[in-house]
Image (cartoon, rainbow, N blue to C red):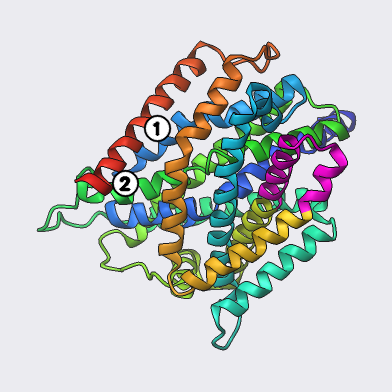
Amino acid sequence: MSYSAETSFFARCIALLKLLGPGVLMATAAVGGSHLVASTQAGAKFGWQLALLILVVNLLKYPFFRAGVSYTISTKQTLQQGYLGMGKRYLAIALGLNSVASVVNAAALLLFAASLLSYFIPFNIAITLSASVVLALILIILLAGHFEGLDNIAKGIMAVLVIATVAVFIVALSNYSVSPAPAVAAPSPWTLATLGFLVVTMGWMPAPIEISSITSLWLKRQCKGQAVTPKSALFDFNLGYAVTVLLALLFLGLGALILYGSGTELNTSGIGFSHQLISMYSSTIGQWAHWLIALVAFLCIFGSALTVYDGYARVVAEAIALLFNKDKNARNTLVTPVLLFMAVASFIIVLFFKSALLAMLGFAMTLAFVTTPMFAWLNHKLVAQTQLHPDASPNFAIKLLSYVGLAYLFGFLFVFVWWKWFL
């Protein structure tokens, strides 16, 4: 390869990396409790039995996440503006659901990040204190306006996490030896008794659907700074989405290869689970990577928390401004008070769940599962009635998948409500 050809190749790679943004940020926000916790738990409890469920859930939710990119790149408006175009009641529904989800999801990630931070401290520290430190860092970064520079950091974190997880999975797979069939048959996840666990697994898989509104907002902001085409926007989104699916399966595999059948019970406390999670990596790949893995895990969850606080605050602020006919300056002004409200409310929730990380995450994922059908329906309705750019418009397969996804989401919600309150 000539020097000019090499230069051209690297120039194209750099140009491609610059176009990556909202999709990678979505993946950063998604790879949190659903992957490090729910997928690992699924593998530890049931081996590989839930791999198909994870694939199907990600597939059926795909059209509703994609809607945020398709709509924004075609109209140069956010999903929130689209909801308002359908009628104020639609935006009001989205605002109400987002207001609750923002606080609960932020609290879950804050507690998880605080638990991982405590791992680096050589003495016992109250989880509320470490949560205070994490929350202070998030607020300093966002209020100082330095979030824009974290786009590249998010790409770096995702790259390191993917490489580390693939490496650990390969080592775990190479070390795995098939043991004789156990005397007791493996438990089946396909029973009414495990329905609650299935709901938790699906709730944040790959992320709550309202993240599509955040992706939409990020994409609109990206379009103002650079030329983004429908094809490049969808490539960015599809790449980020594919990474979340891959990581979900890899974490399931790690739980199946390392923890399944070992008799190890996952600790419900934040610090205890964090120790188990990091030990699972380091015991497989080698103790030399112990602190590196701990740092990557913390940065992953901290990045998720950071993007969630920023994204939800902007989405809620935008919805309030649109509902009350405020101008763009008013929307920007509202972001800070909404962010501070989220910070206070989420910290109060952490005080309540401080000794039970898995319970907090389970609550957040269940809430996401319950609200997901409504967000899916809003996105489906908006895309169906909008004239989209030909390169961003869903084809027949995606339209069909959207209807099947709605049937699945509402159907499973009805089954869950019946199981939870009427059985």
Q: What residue is rendered at 51% in x and 11% in y?
A: 396
Residue 404 in the image, given as x and y percentages of width and height: 40, 22
Q: Amino acid at mark 2?
A: Trp
Residue 317 in the image, given as x and y percentages of width and height: 73, 45
Residue 326 is a magenta residue: yes
The circle on residue 409 is 1
Residue 157 in the image, given as x and y percentages of width and height: 67, 54
Q: Quadrant of residue 315?
A: top right
Q: What residue is rendered at 13% in x and 53% in y?
A: 185
Q: Earlier in the sequence, mark 2 or mark 1?
A: 2
Q: Mark 2, mark 1: which one is toward the viewer? A: 1
Residue 13 is a magenta residue: no
Please, is residue 16 above or below residue 50 in the view? above
Q: What residue is rendered at 60% in x and 48% in y?
A: 99
Q: Amino acid at mark 1?
A: Leu
In the rendered view of the protein, which quadrant contains the N terminus? top right
Residue 43 in the image, given as x and y percentages of width and height: 34, 53
Q: What residue is rendered at 36% in x and 46% in y?
A: 199
According to the image, label 2 marks what residue? 48
For the stretch drawn in magenta, the main secondary structure is: helix
Residue bounds of the magenta highlight: 310-335
